[in-house]
Image (cartoon, coloured by chain):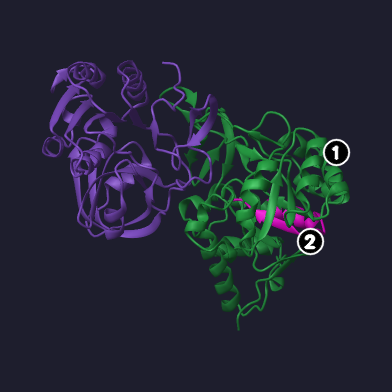
Chain colours: A purple, B green
Amino acid sequence: MPFHLCCSITETENIAQDQFSIVFDSVKLADFVKAGQFLHIACGDALTLRRPISICDTDKSLVKVVFTVKGAGTRWLSLRKPGDMLDILGPLGNGFDMKGENLLLIGGGAGVPPLLLAARQAAALPQFESVTALLGFSDIGKAILLGDFAAACTSVEIATDDGSLGRHGFVTDLLKYRLNTKRFDQILACGPYNMLRIVSEIADEYDIPCQVSMEERMGCGIGACLTCSCKTKSAGKEKYSRVCADGPVFSSREVVWNEA
Amino acid sequence: MKPDLTVNFAGVCFKNPVTVASGTFGFGKEYSSFYDLSELGGICVKGLTEKGRDGNPPPRIAETPMGILNSVGFQNPGVDLFMETELPFLKRFDTRIIANISGNTVEEYRRMAEKLSDAVDILEVNISCPNIKSGGIAFGTSPESAAAVTHAVKQVSKIPVMVKLTPNVTDIASIAKACEDAGADALSLINTILGMKINIETGRPVLRNNTGGLSGPAVFPIAVRMVWQVCSAVKIPVMGMGGITTGEDAIEMFFAGASLISVGTANFGDPKAPLKIKKGIDDYLIRKNKPSLDCIRGRLETY
C-alpha cells in the first residue's frame, strides 16, 4: 500500500558529472521499502507527470535516491537543497525477490543505484553466503557508489566501455567469466534494455534464475493508466504487464524481449 | 451555510459534480488505497470493448508542455470480464458508475449497451478515441455516424446514454446536435486532441503509435471553449472535461455550461486531485455566497 508523503531533504550531492544523490527523512518509507521498489516524485508545478526514481539506500529513518539528469524533471530534482520538501508517492512496484545463498547483482549506468539496497538487504538475511556485484559504466567519470558496494558486497568487479576503470568492455562480459568460475543461485539485474536482454540470454544459457528491473515511460505509477507496458508471457500467452505495478522487477524468462 | 453540490444529471442523482475520467482511473482499485471512492460523484471506468484488447506497443506516454500524449489503445479485459471481476469492487462504493464503451461497428456498441444497461448508472458511448485504427473516432467525426451509434445504443439501453465527443472536428456543435436529435441523454467532452512528439536525437516519434491523444492543462482552454459551444447548441446536460486540475478550473467549466466535470490527467500528478477540486468548488460557492451549482451553471455573460 503506497503512501503519499511530503518529505524533508537532509542532504544533496552531485556525486559524479550528471549524477546526483538526495537523502530525505521518512520513517514510513525507510521501514517499508524493499530493494527494487521505486518512488514517484513530483518535480515542480511545470511538469504534469511525476518521475519514477529507484531507491538506492536506507539508513534508520533516512532514504537515499541516486539519479541521472536526463531532462526537465531530473534537472529540477538536481537543483533541490537541504530543507526543501519533496512530494513523494511510494514505495511503488514489487521489488526484488531475494532467494538462494549466493547472489549475483549486475548493474549498468543509471541502473546501478537500486542494486546497493539489494546488496544491503541481502547481506542482512541469514541464509546468504555471498553477494557479488558486477557494475558497468561508460567511463571512470560516471562510476558511482563504488565504496558503498565494496562495503556491502563480498566482491565487486567493474567494467567500463572505454577501459578507464576496471575491465575494458561491457559488464555482460564480466558476467560470463564470473558464471564460469562460481555457481550462483540468483541474478538480479538493472540497467539499459540491451544489457538486460543479454544478461537474460546468459542466465538462460547457465540456467540461473534471473530477475530484471524494467524501465518504461510512466504515467500514474500505481497501475491505473496502463501506459508503462512491458510485454510478458506466462503459460504461452503474451500480454502487456504494467511496469509500475506488476513490475518493475520481472523474471527474465517472463519478459518478451524485442529483437536486438 | 453548506452549499448544495448535488446534481441531477439526465435523471441520475450525483451527490457532487466531480467524476474521474475514463482511462485515467482504471477500475478504481489503485486509487482506492489513497481515499474512499465514495467521496466521488462518479467514476467513468477504463474504456471497454466487446472483446478484451491488448493495447498498443510501448512507449505509450510522452510528456509535453503542461500535458501528456498517450496511445494506450484500449487495453482492457472486455465487457464480460469487467462485469465479472471489476464491477463488484466498484459497486461497494456509494458513487455513480459510468461505463465507457467503444465498438468497431454499430452492432458492437448495441450488444455492449445491452449487457451493461442493468449493471451501471450511465453508459458513456465513446466515439472519440484517437488511438485505434478502426471504430472509435471514426464514428465521432461526422454527424451522421455519431447519430447512428447514438440511435442504436438508445434503442436497447434502459439507462441514460451519454455520448463522448472528440475535439478533432471542425464543428463540434453540429455533432453534439446530431447526438441530441438521435436521442442522447447527455454528452461528455472533450476526449483527447490528436498530437505528436518527436525525439530529435533519433528522428523518430516518441510514441510507438507515432501519434497520441493530448490531455492535461494544455488542452483546458480548448475544452472550455468546446463545452461552451456545445452547451449553447443543445439542451441535454454536459459533462465537461479536458485538463481540469483545480477547483477554479471546474468553476470555469460550470460557467461554460457543464453540469458535471471529470478529472483525468490531474490524477497522475496528485492522486487526491478530485477531492481537492471538490473542496475548491465548495470554497468558491461559499465565498460567492451561492447556495448551489445552479447559480453558476451556464451563467456566463459573454461579450
Dot 1 falls on a residue whose secondary structure is: helix
Viewer-nearest residue: A245 or B163? A245
Dot 2 falls on a residue whose secondary structure is: loop
Identify the residue under disc 2: B10
The part of the image, by quadrant, that contains residue A29 is bottom left
* Part of the protein shown in magenta: B226-242
The residue under the point 80% across, 40% down is: B111
Give how far apart the Cα atoms at labels 2 and 1 are. 23 Å
The residue under the point 62% across, 39% down is: B76
**Visible residue check, residue A163:** no
The residue under the point 80% across, 58% down is: B236
**Rendered-image quadrant of the C terminus of chain B:** bottom right
Q: Are marks 2 and 1 on the same chain?
A: yes
Amino acid carrying mark 2 in the image: Ala
**What chain is tagged by disc 2?**
B
The residue under the point 74% across, 53% down is: B119
Residue A148 image point, x, y percent: 14, 39
